[in-house]
Amino acid sequence: MMAATGITTSEKPPRLGPYKPTVILHGGAGVITRDSLPPELWSKYHASLLNYLTSARKLLDSGGSALDAACYAVTQFEDDPLFNCGRGSVFTEQGTIEMEASVMVSSIEPAGPPVGAIKRAAAVSLIRNTRHPILLAKEVLTAADDDGGFGGISSMHSHLSGSQVEEWGWNEKGLEKKPDRWFWTKKRWEEHRRGLQKSNAYTFEDLLASQGPDSDSSPLSPDEELLERIGVSNIPSQGTVGAVCLDSWGNLAVATSTGGLTNKKAGRIGDTPTIGAGFWAESWTDDVPLSAEGRRYDAIRMRPHSLALDHLWRLGSWFAPCLNGSGSDVEDSRWNDAPPAYTAIPTPTPTRATPSQAYYSPLCPIMPVPSGDQTLRRAVAMSGTGNGDSFLRTDAVRTAAAMARFSASTSLADAVTAVAGPGGLLQSSAGNRWGRTAEGLGGIIGVELIESADTANPGILYGHTKGSGHKSGRAVFDFNCGGLFRAYYEIDEEGQKEKPVAMVFRDEY
C-alpha cells in the first residue's frame, strides 16, 4: 500500500487480527485560551485533527500496521503550517529551521512487533531539508531489520542527526528533499522576530527574497491566509505533534515530530528525539497473585485511581531539591490540596483533588476473572508535548511507564495524570517558576493494552467488545496547562459505540 506521502506499509497481513485498532493524536499544548484561539481558527484545527485521526484509523482498519498508521498521521501534521513541525516549524534564534522526530514500537505479543522490534526506538534531529522528518526516523528504526541487528555498530544507532542522515535518507531511501523556504511561514517568522525584540525592518518578504528572485513568488497557503485575515499574532499550537496507534495484531507504535522551541539555541536537542523523555513504548509480563485479601488484577482493572499519585508526592518531596536547586519553594500539595505557588494560567486548572478530570476510554465488558494466580501481558505507548526541557529533566514519559510497570495497581491513566496532570511531576519540577515561565507545561497521550497471557485462565482486562469478538486497548491523556490539541475515539460506557472527537480545552470549545 502506497500513500500519497510516500509511506509504504511495512506489513500486509492476509486478514485482520483479534484486536480492535485505535489511535490518539496530539497537536501541541500550552497556554491556550479562547482569546488566542478564535472560533474560526479553532474550526480549522478541529477539522484538521479529525481528518488526520480518521485517515489513520482507516489505514488501521484496512490492516495497516501501528507503525505505518502513526507515521502517516504525523506526515499530515508535517504538511500543515498550523502545527509546529515540518512546514510549520518554528525558527531558532539564528533564524534557521531545525526539526526533530522519533518513533518507538512495542507489542502485546512476547515476540514483539514484526517491524522495528530490534531497535525498538529511533530518532533524528537537526533536520533542515527533509519534507517528512518522521519518515526519516522510521527508516533509522527499520535499518537493522534486514540483517537482524548483525550488520555492525552503525546499523544499530538509535539517534542520528544533521546533514549526513538527511543525505542518507534522500539518496538511499528515496525521501523527499525540500528547499529552506518550504518550511518557512510568515507567522512563525514574525514570532521569531518579536521574541528577539527585533524590529520589523527585515520582513518575511525580505527573507524570501534573500533566497533568489523566484523565492517570493509563491502565495501564502490557505491556512496562512486565514491567520492573516483574523489577525492572530501567535499560532496557538507551539509544541510537539504525535500519534499513538494500536493495530489489529496487538502492536503499538508512537510517532512524534516537532520544530522545537521558538528561538531555541541552534543545535539544541529537545525531548522529542530523546528516548524516554518525549516518547516511549514497552511491554512486559506480570505474574499476578490473586489473594483473598484483594486481587491486583481487579485493582488494575477497576480502581479509578491508584497508589501512583501517592508515590509521586513522596518522590517529589525527596527529589525537589535536585529538580529546583533548593526545595524551600516547593510545598507538598498532597497536604495542601494545591500545586506549588504559581501565578494564574488562563483556564481554571483542577488540583489533585479532582483527578477524574483526566481522560481514559471506558473499559469494555470484562470476562469473569478465574481464581488462582494470573499472568498478564501489558503494553503501553505514549507521546508527550509541552516544555521539552521539563520533559527532559523528569524523563517524563518513561517515568509514567515505570509507574504503571513497577507500582502495584497502577493503570496508565493514573500514571499519566501523576506526571502530566495538574499538580503532577512536570508542574512540580518548575518549582516557584510555575506560571511565571512556560516551564513545566505539557501533556501526555497514550494507549494501554492489558490481557491475560495464561491460556488456561483467559480472563482479559480490556476484554471482548460485545458482538465483535475483538479485544480492545484504552486511550488515555492528561495535561496541566490551558489546552492540549488532541483527537481520539470516544467510547461509550458499554464499550459499544465510538465516535471521533477533537478537543483543545478540558471542556468543549
Image (spheres, grey):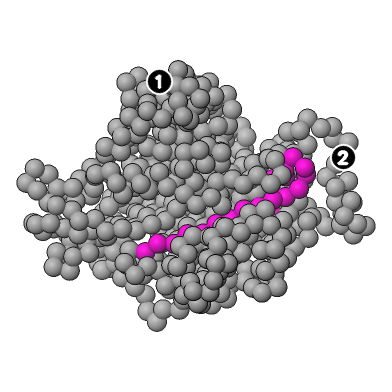
71 in relation to 307, above or below: below
Q: What stretch is highlighted in magenta?
A: 85-107
Give the quadrant of residue 370.
bottom left
Q: Name the residue under label 2.
A: 202
180 left or right, relative to 502:
right
Residue type, label 2: Tyr
Residue type, label 1: Glu
* Residue 320 is at least partly visible in this image: yes
Few, some or many residues within 10 Å of mark 1 (<14, 14–19, 20+): many
Q: Earlier in the sequence, mark 2 or mark 1?
A: 2
In magenta stretch: residue 190: no
Question: Element under label 1?
Answer: loop
In magenta stretch: residue 94: yes
Q: Name the residue under label 1.
A: 331
Name the residue furthest bottom: 14
Expressed as whole percent of the image width and height from the top left, the position of residue 175 reads 67, 69
Rendered image: mark on residue 314: none
Is 443 in front, or is 268? 268
Total residue callouts: 2
Is 429 in front, or is 435? 429
Few, some or many residues within 10 Å of mark 2 (<14, 14–19, 20+): few
Expressed as whole percent of the image width and height from the top left, the position of residue 14 reads 40, 82
Is 388 in front, or is 445? 388
What residue lies at 48% left-to-right and 71% top-to-bottom?
149
Front disc: 2 or 1: 1
What residue lies at 12% left-to-right and 44% top-to-bottom?
294
| CA gap, disc 2 and disc 1 | 47 Å
52 in relation to 240, above or below: below
Expressed as whole percent of the image width and height from the top left, the position of residue 223 reads 69, 51
Name the residue furthest front: 153
63 left or right, relative to 18:
right
* Residue 55 is at least partly visible in this image: no
